[in-house]
Image (spheres, rainbow, N blue to C red):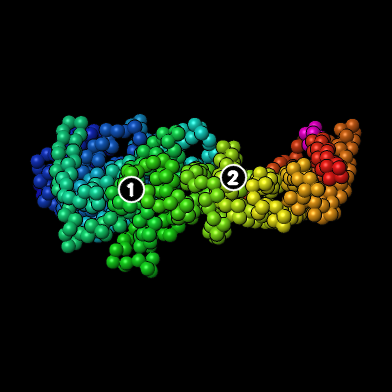
């Protein structure tokens, strides 16, 4: 029998055993002395053997543990017996061709499932099984480490980017509810793939570890249900001419930073829930700290960004790291380091002032807060809260506002305060906003509040909050009195009645209440004879632009809603309601805003009736405060 016939018989028999899940027979055939000699002498057999095993893995049911482990073992032994270069190319070819619904898969009662859940999980079988053999091959190629490593990682990263976070991004969980995220199909995929990939990267991080630069020995244990074999290899001499440790660190840094952006940025990494993803993130941060010993030095590593003209082209790799990805990665790293204490003490120097630390993290906070994904902007909230908590009251000078204008985190906080669907996030954003204002000196406080109040089309709730915070600062400094108070009040009055008597009082409800309360508070605190605040000098303006127009606006609004109330009563008595229970009145109720807002569908007449009654009650409340303010002024 010719060698070619022996080869075909061997491959056919092996395929038969694998297809029928006869793993013990497959291992015995593979380790037969004659077959092992064939594998060692026939250099081309890897191009048949590796695809054969990988095809068995594709579509494999997730509960076929024995089949998976055996296939992984066979690939590992191929990586030891065959030429490493040939095996490397064959492995990468399989990874690049790995797609959902590839050839192979379970059949018959043995276990194929058409369920999407299993199908999606099985798509990662080849990737997971090939990592250890690939690591073994790379360890055997120390003199070509930089070239082969970036080639391999580029291919592996392409697979990692296919890990979906779509369903995770849709969740609006809060607190302990986030524990359910680990049960999501996409989260399960990530938590099954990333540990193996991170372990793979750790092997090569050990070679260039800046905390202990020495040659180490890597021991890999390979075994099946019946046999075990230990393969011991020595790691590369990273000081060799063809393997620059600096370049290898850059390659690994890029791969690890990409993981922090996708998929880890989209997962719950808090200590509160102790999810599986948190442990993965901690491992990634620890590996990064072994490649770059100073956390703040990473801020300057613009050379890692792809196509960066100022960077050194000699250190560039094939692993793409865009500027956007770099910022996302650093934002997540900042969150993990400062909020989750996921690093060694010496990785985070404490020589910088808290103001400086907050300043250099502003771009990362803003990046996180601008996301529409709750798990992402929550990280921005936690990072902002942590860094601001270390800054004392009045410690930020007014000129710090120039940086805030360039990186307007307060606008992102406002969006979350107003539109987030998660109550704890809204409350946290409010707390951070207050803390941000208090952190400024008196001049900065005045400027940031006036700036927010002067901006057109701001949410009424925010305007009311700004006026309320200003009221708390009123008598703490002369900066909040006199002409400064006049400017603030004029902005508040303009915001309260943007269209004078035609203004929508319900929409401007919070602003109107806050403005009237501010005027009442000052009048009671500062009498006309004292006039410390100079409010009384502005009374003619207040009367002409707020008090009188507000009376007229209340009369118009009350008349409008009473008319609507009459129409609703007529429809109830006449029964002019269509079959669906809806009526012909053009009446809409708007809620929310850009994040979650919209218009409620048509609602039953009874509910509309209640809404109109509540509106009329609200007008009565506004009028009562208005009358009280006028009484105080006239006393």
- Specify the quadrant of the image occupied by residue 581: top right
> Which residue in the structure is indicated by mark 2?
434
Q: Secondary structure at mark 1?
A: helix
Residue 419 left/right relative to 34: right
In this picture, residue 226 sits left or right of residue 495: left
The x, y position of residue 474, in whole percent, is 68, 47
The residue under the point 65% across, 54% down is 479
**Of residues 205 and 227, the one drawn nearer to the viewer in this rendering:** 205
The percent position of residue 410, horizontal first and vertical second, equals 58, 51
Q: Is residue 65 left or right of residue 590?
A: left
Quadrant holding the C terminus: top right
Q: Residue at the spot x=88%, y=40% of the render?
A: 562
**Res 60 visible:** yes
The span shown in magenta is 606-612
Crowding at mark 1 (Cα within 10 Å: few <14, some 14-19, many 20+): some
Q: Secondary structure at mark 2?
A: helix
Return the residue at label 1: 347
């Amino acid at each position: 029998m010719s060698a070619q016939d022996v080869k075909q018989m061997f491959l056919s028999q092996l395929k038969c055993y694998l297809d029928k899940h006869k793993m013990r027979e497959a291992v015995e055939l593979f380790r037969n002395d004659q077959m092992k000699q064939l594998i060692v002498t026939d250099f081309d057999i890897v191009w048949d053997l590796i695809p054969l095993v990988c095809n068995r893995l594709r579509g494999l049911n997730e509960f076929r543990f024995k089949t998976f482990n055996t296939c992984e073992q066979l690939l590992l032994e191929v990586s030891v017996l065959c030429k490493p270069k040939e095996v490397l190319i064959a492995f990468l070819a399989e990874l690049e061709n790995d797609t959902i619904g590839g050839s192979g898969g379970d059949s018959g009662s043995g276990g194929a499932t058409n369920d999407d859940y299993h199908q999606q999980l099985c798509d990662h079988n080849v990737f997971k099984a090939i990592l250890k053999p690939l690591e073994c091959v790379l360890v055997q190629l120390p003199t070509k480490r930089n070239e082969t490593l970036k080639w391999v990682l580029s291919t592996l990263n392409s697979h990692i980017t296919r890990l979906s976070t779509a369903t995770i991004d849709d969740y609006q969980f809060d607190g302990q509810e986030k524990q359910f995220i680990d049960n999501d199909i996409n989260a399960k995929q990530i938590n099954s793939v990333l540990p193996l990939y991170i372990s793979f990267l750790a092997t090569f991080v050990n070679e260039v570890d800046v905390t202990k630069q020495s040659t180490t020995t890597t021991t890999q244990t390979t075994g099946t249900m019946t046999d075990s074999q230990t393969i011991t290899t020595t790691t590369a001499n990273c000081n060799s001419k063809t393997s620059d440790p600096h370049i290898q660190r850059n390659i690994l840094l890029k791969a690890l930073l990409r993981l922090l952006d996708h998929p880890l940025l989209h997962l719950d990494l808090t200590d509160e829930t102790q999810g599986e993803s948190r442990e993965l993130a901690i491992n990634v941060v620890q590996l990064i700290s072994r490649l770059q010993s100073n956390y703040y030095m990473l801020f300057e590593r613009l050379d890692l960004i792809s196509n960066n003209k100022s960077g050194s082209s000699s250190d560039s790799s094939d692993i793409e790291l865009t500027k956007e990805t770099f910022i996302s990665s650093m934002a997540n790293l900042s969150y993990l380091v400062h909020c989750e204490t996921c690093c060694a003490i010496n990785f985070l120097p404490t020589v910088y002032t808290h103001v400086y630390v907050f300043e250099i993290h502003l771009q990362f906070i803003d990046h996180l807060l601008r996301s529409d994904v709750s798990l992402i902007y929550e990280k921005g909230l936690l990072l902002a809260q942590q860094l601001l908590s270390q800054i004392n009251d009045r410690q930020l000078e007014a000129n710090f506002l120039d940086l805030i204008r360039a990186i307007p985190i307060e606008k992102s906080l406002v969006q979350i305060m107003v539109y987030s669907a998660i109550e704890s996030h809204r409350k946290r954003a409010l707390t951070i906003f207050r803390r941000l204002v208090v952190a400024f000196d008196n001049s900065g406080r005045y400027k940031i509040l006036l700036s927010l109040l002067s901006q057109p089309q701001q949410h009424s709730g925010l305007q009311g909050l700004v006026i309320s915070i200003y009221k708390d600062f009123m008598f703490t400094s002369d900066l909040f009195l006199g002409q400064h108070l006049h400017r603030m009040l004029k902005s508040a009055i303009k915001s309260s009645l943007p269209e004078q008597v035609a203004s929508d009082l319900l929409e401007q409800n919070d602003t109107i209440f806050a403005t009237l309360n501010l005027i009442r508070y000052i009048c009671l605190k500062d009498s006309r004879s004292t006039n410390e605040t100079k409010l009384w000098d502005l009374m003619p303006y207040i009367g002409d632009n707020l008090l009188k127009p507000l009376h007229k606006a209340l009369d118009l609004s009350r008349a409008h809603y009473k008319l609507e109330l009459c129409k609703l009563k007529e429809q109830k008595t006449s029964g002019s309601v269509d079959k669906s229970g809806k009526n012909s009145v053009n009446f809409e109720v708007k809620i929310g805003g850009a994040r979650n807002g919209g218009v409620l569908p048509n609602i039953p007449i009874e509910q509309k009736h209640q809404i109109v009654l509540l509106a009329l009650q609200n007008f009565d409340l506004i009028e009562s405060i208005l009358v009280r303010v006028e009484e105080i002024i006239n006393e």
